[in-house]
Image (spheres, rainbow, N blue to C red):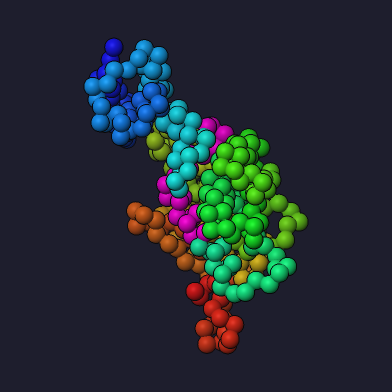
Amino acid sequence: MPTVGELLQTATLRLRTSGSESPRLDAELLLGWAIGADRTRLIAHPEAPVGADAASAYESAVARREAGEPVAYIRGLKEFHGLAFVVDARALIPRPETELLVTQAEREVAWRLTSAPRPAGTPPVRVVDVGTGSGAIAIGLAVLLRKRRMLPEVSILAVDSSAEALDLARENAVGHAVADEIDFVESDLLPAGERPFDVILANLPYIPSADLATLPVAASFEPRGALDGGPDGLAVIRRLLATLPVALASNGTALLEIGFDQCPALEVAVAELPGEWTSRVDNDLSGRPRLAHVERARPAAGMLGGLGAAPGLR
């Protein structure tokens, strides 16, 4: 009967040879999945024997990873912002850098709920997650707002052009007990006839088409439409930007994930919108420009009188 240490050593070598960028981590995650244990337990007990059924399941999983299939698809789940999401080929696997979008969305919504009194009858803060995929952004935000007891004052809409992706998002919403707090709608970008939104969130495709062939093999298992951003990576994002004059409330904010080298092109696209608009970009945890804030231009601070700072000036 093989031991944990023996299986990990063999699998790590196989995955390194096959071109995995993180062979040891992949081997540990897959073995933990096969035997129902976390990585800490595996590392602490390399001498532990592994039964025949678990060893067989592990062998199958390693072979799938050797062929390039993402670990998340093999395990059927991905951790994101402290939550576990069901993932499969219906939608893009949530990336760690996208956690910044959820964090900033929570801050944006919380600011709108606490910066001024909200008399009875005040409409909820309207939020939309465009291209929701697995639902990670909308669900992550809903869970955070529930912890702060703010969810009743927020309306969250999640949209995607893929009916299959929306089914996956609904499954994840049920799993995190927020299915009744999020409306899911099939639409190419924003649905027609909606009232303006206070906060628009989007992690849309932003990989230039020519760069798709250079991505790790694992990306080839994901929906191409969730990755392909057109010639310069901003084709879909530009389409969303074009809707902002109508879709974004007068004091609203759009938070858009972009490629780290797309800031100049994004600034040009924002400058071309009718009216006066501003944009700034936050860095992700790797220090790379990642999250664009797009808003209508605000009056200078000295012109605000007693109204207090507008969202773009806080």
Instruction: Tell me: residue 240, above or below residue 273.
Output: above
Q: Residue furthest right?
A: 193
Name the residue at 54% across, 68% down: 111
Q: Give how far across and how far down residue 118 sits, in percent.
A: 65, 71
- Residue 91 visible in the current orientation: yes
The residue range painted magenta reads: 88-106
Q: Quadrant of the N terminus?
A: top left
Q: Nearer the viewer, residue 111 or 198?
A: 111
- Where does the image place residue 281, in percent across and percent down from the top left? 45, 63
Residue toward you, 50 or 246 = 50
Establish if 221 lies above or below 270: above
Residue located 44% across and 40% down the image: 79
Q: Does the magenta run of residues contain 228?
A: no
Taking the spot 51% from the left edge, 42% from the top edge, the residue there is 227
Observer-nearest of 157 and 234: 157
> Residue 285: percent from the left, percent from the top?
36, 54
Rendered position, 141 above or below 38: below
Instruction: Give the tally of numbered discs.
Output: 0
Residue 6 in picture, x, y percent from top left: 25, 20
Query: Residue at point 59% right, 67% down?
Result: 113
Please state which of residues 176 and 274 is positioned toward the viewer in this rendering. Answer: 176
Q: Is residue 265 visible?
A: no
